[in-house]
Image: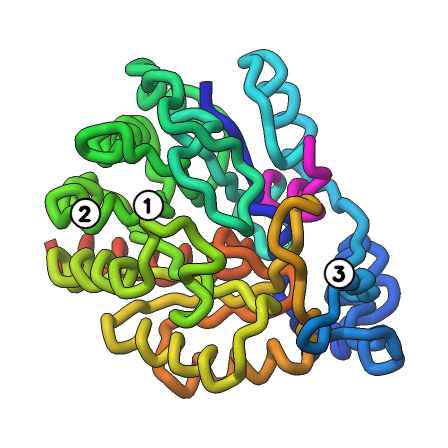
Amino acid sequence: MFTITCDNVSCYKVELQCVKEKTFSQKLEDGPHLQHFIADTYKDYDGKLKLEKGDKSRLRLPPWLKTEIPMGKNYNRIKSQLRQLQLSTVCEEARCPNIGECWGGGTHGTATATIMLMGDTCTRGCRFCSVKTSKTPLPLNPEEPLNTATAIAEWGLDYIVLTSVDRDDLSDAGASHIAETVKEIKKRTNILVECLVPDFRGNENCVATIVNSNLDVFAHNVETVERLTPFVRDRRAQYRQSLKVLKTAKEYKPELITKSSIMLGLGETDEEIEQTMKDLREVNVDALTLGQYMQPTKRHLRVIEYVTPEKFKKWENIGNELGFLYTASGPLVRSSYKAGEFFLTNILKKRRNKQSENQ
């Protein structure tokens, strides 16, 4: 069995310019998207946005992090197929506001889904993540690559993100399993495939296995700044090791698009965020997403700060100045981000057309 997930809470970009240009009737036709009201809410909000040192309280959720769930045109069809296949979805269970937008194509016209491979139990215990953990998860299902490819071939999607739990119990940390899934998908469809992969304990052979699978985007998240990494991520997930994984993927295949993500609101400073962005550019990462950390349960790390949409816009501008191919930055942006996938889809399709013309 595999799980469809929409990567935590949501994945919207704050597009203030786009909001201003739309008429009221257009907004009604588009549905209750966050960007339609976010610009008018955060400036008037007078609630507490940051905890001071020693403050043990919890911050209230600001209005720009509250959304309705829009339903795209393909939503009901995919949901019906999932029921027939008896597949569980984190998207539905967590009431992800991006579920209709991702499955249906939404305003961007690119239908996407994020599939979590290798079970629902991770061998690591990062303090921001609510996925179940165990030293000995269930064995891999050898039929999963084929079953996954067969299922999604009927969904009419444009872009698939394959993500997974960490499987340190396996000799190759699951690299060959992920790669086999990519190959099965490519046999049956022209869907663009992004793999959001673990660090494979820094094993370069595992990275090569993924790179050689014919995927379109190689993603691995640094998650947070270097200083906070030991407190936020599992002790085996090291900041420099993550950078090495991204660098290695690019060295194996320079034309491959690489991607990473940073959560904000865990106590990082502006200087640390900018340094992290520079570190990612130094290893030639092409695409970057920055989003708000959301505490999944009371057992997990508290939110230290709710970053305003205005501040996220600043990081988007800095990302563009640093030379990222694409920077998605907003309160509800996640590593699997709808508009980012739309943007990357256009780039990848143009590359495909150019290659066809040259042949």
Check if residue 102 falls in the magenta segment: yes
Quadrant (top left, top right, bottom left, bottom right) of the N terminus: top left
123 sits to left or right of 79? left
Q: Residue 137 location in percent, x, y?
A: 39, 22
Counting from the top left corner in percent of width and height, residue 3 is at 51, 28
Give amino acid for label 1. Answer: Pro
Q: Residues within 10 Å of mark 3 (few under 14, many from 20)?
A: some
Q: Residue at x 55, y 54 (%)?
A: 338
> Which one is in front in this view, the residue at disc 3 or the one at disc 1?
1
Residue 251 position within the rendered picture, expressed as x and y whole percent measured from the top left: 13, 62
- Which residue lies at the image location 71% right of the left edge and 77% below the top edge? 52
Type of residue at label 3? Leu
Instruction: Identify the residue under disc 2.
Output: 207
| Above or below for 231 versus 146 | below
Q: Quadrant of residue 88?
A: top right
Q: Do the numbered discs 1 and 2 sit on residues whose CB atoms are within 8 Å?
A: no
Q: In this rendering, is residue 43 above or below 241?
A: below
Ranked by sequence position, the earlier of labels 2 and 3 is: 3
